[in-house]
Image: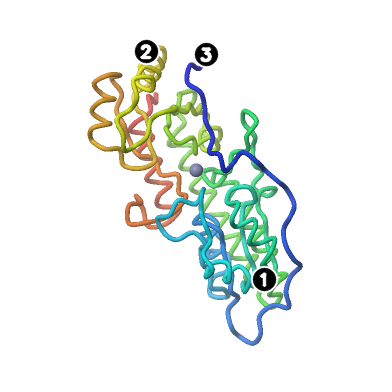
Amino acid sequence: MLRIRVVTIAAALTLTLGACGGSPSAGPTGNEPLQVAASFYPLQWVTSQVAGEHADVTSLTPPGAEPHDLELGPRQVATVAEADLVVYLDGFQPAVDAAVAQEAGGSALEVSDTADLVETGGTVDPHFWLDPTRLADVADAVAQRLGEVDPAHSAAFTERAAEVRARLEALDAELREGLAGCAGTDLVTSHTAFGYLAARYGMEQVGITGLSPESEPSPNALAEVADFVADNDVRTVYSETLVSPEVAKTLARETGVRTAVLDPLEGLSSESSGEDYLAVMRANLAVLQEGQPCR
Ligand SMILES: [Zn+2]
């Protein structure tokens, strides 16, 4: 009996499959590293882990920028056009999809099939990287494609992907163990980015409309939260950015819940709770253990 509707980001409303541009280019000349463009942080992280010193991996989404509604400037479009490989997620960043379709001179790797995106309520949820095992599958796909673009280093890419998989599976085991007592609890979020994480570790994501980090919550949003808290064992509402003290105070006063920050890892910045994907996921684990009514 969920009284709170789950909303999903507008950019995720459509999923058009296929449409990955181009065939593998001739590859690098001499000993120059490959030029690889990844469309946003988790793809940049996994690609650079697999590529090692054999590629320069840049992100099309600047650090700290919101990837959902990314606009590409001429410089990023040129980066797409000149890259030996572009790694992206179709349907997540329409500007990137368009640039790849029109500009990608080299190879493009589209990861939505590999990531096995899930549809909820008629919309496709793009936030697969919050389940480390899906990101490990993407690491393997990146290694395979890099090996096609740069066959001389194909064995190194495969080896590095296996190392990345081992680290991601270790993280998965930590999350599974750390959240074992939280199974069956509601994960109440203002940004519904955590569906894959919730599903993997046995929680249910509940999204709240009308809660924005900056403004005072509307009376309707407060009433929704209060009703839900009254009917369920909810202790914490998670937001993706720092909630202003006013919002946190209002929520606590009106509904009795606390607020906490879960990082959806859409970008990495000085505001992030760790220095890379693995560290931020471990910080998220600590936040969840503190905030969820775990046994
Ligand atoms: Zn998102």
Q: On the picture, is 117 further left or further right than 188?
A: right
Quadrant into which the C terminus falls? top left
Where does label 1 land, which residue? Answer: 155
Where does label 3 land, which residue? Answer: 1
Along the line of sight, the residue nearer the viewer: 90 or 112: 90
Instruction: Give the image location of residue 271, x and y in percent.
Output: 32, 52
Separation of marks 1 and 3 at Cα, in angstroms:
52 Å
Q: Residue at x 23, y 28 (%)?
A: 249
Residue 230: give its label: 2
N-term-proximal mark, 2 vs 3: 3
Q: Which residue is drawn at 37% across and 24% down?
A: 293
Instruction: Give the image location of residue 212, x and y in percent.
Output: 37, 34
Instruction: Give the image location of residue 55, x and y in percent.
Output: 57, 73
User: How many numbered discs, if any?
Assistant: 3
> The residue under label 3 is which amino acid type?
Met
Specify few, some or many for label 2: CA neighbours under 10 Å numbering under 14, 14-19, or 20 or more: few
- Image vertical order of residue 148 relative to residue 281, above or below: below
> The residue under label 2 is which amino acid type?
Ala
Mark 1 vs mark 2: give the one in front: 2
Q: Which residue is drawn at 71% across and 75% down?
A: 151
Along the line of sight, the residue nearer the viewer: 38 or 212: 212
N-term-proximal mark, 1 vs 2: 1
| Cβ atoms at labels 1 and 2 below 8 Å apart | no
Mark 1 vs mark 3: give the one in front: 3
Instruction: Give the image location of residue 13, x and y in percent.
Output: 61, 38
Label 3 SS: loop
- Image vertical order of residue 170 relative to residue 21, above or below: above
Specify few, some or many for label 3: CA neighbours under 10 Å numbering under 14, 14-19, or 20 or more: few
Q: On the picture, is 254 further left or further right than 95?
A: left
Q: Which residue reaches farthest front?
A: 74
